[in-house]
Image (cartoon, rainbow, N blue to C red):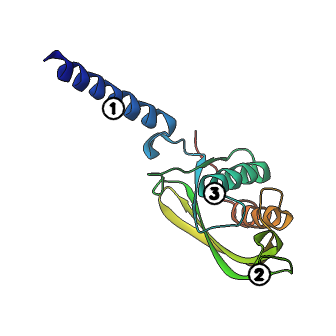
Amino acid sequence: MHVPKIYLSMLTAFVFILTSVAKAETPPASSIESNTFVIVVSGDIPGFTQAQLTDFLAKKTQDEIGAPWHFIAGRSGEELAPNRMVWLFKTLRVEWKGGSHKGFPSPTYSETYLSAEVKLYLKNDYQMTTLDTNPLVMGGPDDKSLFKMVHDVSHALFVENKPNTPLR
């Protein structure tokens, strides 16, 4: 008779702990500082999961731009953060470079041509869009053309067209 009550109490405590941990991992958009940009990604690049790609873009953009800006990887629910960079990747074509396995093209010998559209929002106001087309991507976090894409986009948005410096 007491077993169902104990089970229900434990289940309630477990759910409460899980929701508290989930809330602690990502700050709500309203608590993000004015100099912080959330990186939001849509689309795929070979060699990355969605989370890995978002983390990669946040780190590389931070390396390129630095102070006073701070870039973080967006997670679920942060698509509407007040300051954000929204990356949309589209595959233009995939070329298979020789080699096969039992008659099927091998993905390790493919080259992917992408386009990247990046929109910048500052305090929920659209600022600008930059488009980087046709970069050849082999895939993975060591891809030189992907580094160049992040460099070009970061400089177009934050160096050539400087957003207002955040107020602290």
Up/down of 7 relative to 126, above or below: above
Q: Which mark is residue 103?
A: 2
Q: CA distance from mark 1 to mark 2?
A: 49 Å
Q: Is residue 58 left or right of residue 144?
A: left
Q: Crowdedness of circle 2 by 10 Å Cα count: few (<14), some, many (20+)?
A: few
How far separated are the C-alphas under marks 2 and 3?
Answer: 27 Å
Q: Is residue 53 visible?
A: yes
Looking at the rendering, which quadrant does residue 135 occupy? bottom right
Which of pointers 1 and 3 lies earlier in the amino acid sequence? 1
Q: Is residue 32 above or below residue 9?
A: below
Q: Find residue 15 and name its label.
A: 1
Q: Locate residue 159: give its quadrant.
A: bottom right
Left or right side of 69 for 28: left
Residue drawn at x 82%, y 65% is 148
Q: Is 82 rendered above or below residue 21?
A: below
Dot 1: element: helix
Does the rendering let one see residue 132? no
Mark nearer the N terminus (1 vs 2): 1
Q: CA distance from mark 1 to mark 3?
A: 28 Å
Whether residues under marks 1 and 3 lie with C-beta atoms below 8 angstroms apart, the answer is no
Sequence-wise first label, 2 or 3? 3
Eye-nearest disc, 1 or 2? 2
Say few, some or many: other residues with alpha carbon within 10 Å of mark 3 (under 14 / 14 to 19 / 20 or more). few
Which mark identifies residue 49? 3
